[in-house]
């Protein structure tokens, strides 16, 4: 089973009936699950929830070769690689479309590669890992969401939400113009990704590892061995008595929340990792979730707290 088939299977798994079992090995260790072919054939229309239906196009894309005879890539894996290249190279949409056009010219005519960037994105969007754009005050005071979604001025520093139009600066400009926020926080919803940890049998058995692993006195090999963790357990016993309750570690790259100085960058990533998992898993990239991209160039410092409100 390839990585993309496995990813889709894990998403579907909680919505399908139990079937024949087979063993599967991945980076999380051995697990038991039905083969993908049997899974697809065994599904009945009345057993498929509305949630699962969204994944069927992706399921087809994962099994669909890029062209007849292609052994290296499925349609889905190639689309994922192309979008990764675009991101790594900071490529414009126009350049990406030019590259796609050239690649399609040399592929066999029966290729299934999407025609442009829009359709590449559309193929991946069905995985259900959206990015939510939330307007923010340029000074980091507040987010324009929930009860403040319709505000147009910051409630704390009175800074306007949107960039000033030319006509507002005294320059005549009658062209219709979309309002552009001064700062935008990009939020990748965390809850669906945590739910997938519990839905996948490759990871769900490891969720309680922090409470069950052997400890050596005086040796800290995981955050759960530290005094701060034990103090938290004593302070919140109701939360601690359920080992499946999720405990998150937060990593921010480039800024110190309580520091006096900071460089300027175009953005500030915030990464969340579940510390329930063994150290060999929670420090690996598949389980380090990029959750926020704070707008730059100003160092967020203590203003990051308003951005973290999205985790509520
Ligand atoms: Zn403000």
Image (cartoon, rainbow, N blue to C red):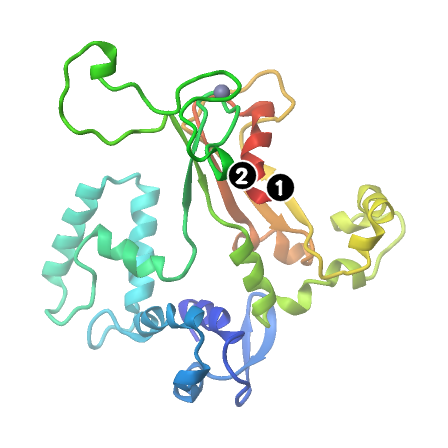
> Residue at coordinates 53% horizontally, 29% vertically from top-left?
254
Separation of marks 2 and 1 at Cα, in angstroms? 7 Å
Where is residue 69, by image quadrant?
bottom left
Classify the position of the C terminus by image quarter. Answer: top right
In the picture shown, does residue 295 fall above or below 39? above
> Residue at coordinates 46% horizontally, 32% vertically from top-left?
144
The residue that mark 2 highlights is: 270
Q: Position of residue 268 (x, y in %)?
A: 48, 32
- The disc at residue 250 is 1
Q: Nearer the viewer, residue 230 or 22?
A: 230
In the picture shown, does residue 199 fall above or below 173? below
Say whether disc 2 or disc 1 marks the residue closer to the N-terminus: 1
Given the current orientation, which residue lies at the most extreme right position? 217
Classify the position of the N terminus by image quarter. Answer: bottom left
- Dots 2 and 1: beta carbons under 8 Å? yes
Q: Position of residue 171 (x, y in %)?
A: 17, 11
Q: Is residue 86 left or right of residue 262?
A: left
Where is residue 153, by image quadrant?
top left
Q: Is residue 272 left or right of residue 45?
A: right
Q: Nearer the viewer, residue 36 or 55?
A: 55
Residue 213 visible: no
Q: Is residue 143 left or right of residue 246?
A: left
């Amino acid at each position: 089973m390839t990585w993309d088939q496995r990813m889709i299977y894990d998403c579907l798994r909680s919505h399908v009936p139990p079937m024949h079992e087979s063993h599967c090995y991945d980076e999380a260790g051995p697990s038991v699950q039905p083969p993908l072919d049997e899974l697809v054939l065994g599904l009945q229309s009345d057993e498929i929830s509305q949630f699962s239906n969204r994944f069927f196009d992706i399921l087809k894309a994962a099994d669909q070769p890029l062209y007849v005879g292609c052994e290296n890539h499925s349609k889905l894996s190639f689309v994922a690689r192309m979008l990764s290249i675009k991101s790594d190279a900071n490529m414009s949409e126009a350049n990406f479309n030019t590259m796609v056009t050239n690649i399609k010219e040399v592929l066999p005519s029966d290729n299934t590669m999407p025609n442009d960037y829009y359709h590449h994105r559309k193929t991946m969007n069905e995985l259900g890992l959206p990015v939510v754009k939330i307007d923010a005050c340029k000074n980091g005071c507040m987010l324009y969401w929930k009860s403040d979604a319709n505000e147009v001025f910051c409630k704390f520093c009175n800074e306007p939400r949107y960039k000033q139009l030319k006509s507002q600066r005294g320059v005549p400009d009658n062209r219709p113009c979309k309002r552009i926020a001064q700062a935008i926080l990009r939020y990748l919803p965390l809850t669906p990704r945590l739910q997938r940890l519990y839905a996948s049998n490759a990871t769900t058995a490891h969720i309680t590892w922090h409470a069950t692993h052997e400890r050596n006195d005086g040796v800290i090999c995981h955050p759960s061995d530290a005094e701060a963790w034990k103090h938290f357990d004593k302070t919140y016993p109701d939360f601690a008595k359920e080992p499946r309750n999720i405990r998150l570690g937060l990593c921010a790259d480039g800024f110190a929340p309580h520091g006096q100085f900071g460089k300027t960058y175009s953005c500030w990533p915030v990464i969340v990792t579940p510390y329930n998992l063994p150290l060999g898993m929670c420090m690996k990239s598949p389980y380090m979730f990029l959750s926020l991209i704070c707008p730059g160039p100003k160092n967020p410092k203590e203003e990051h707290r308003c951005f973290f409100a999205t985790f509520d």
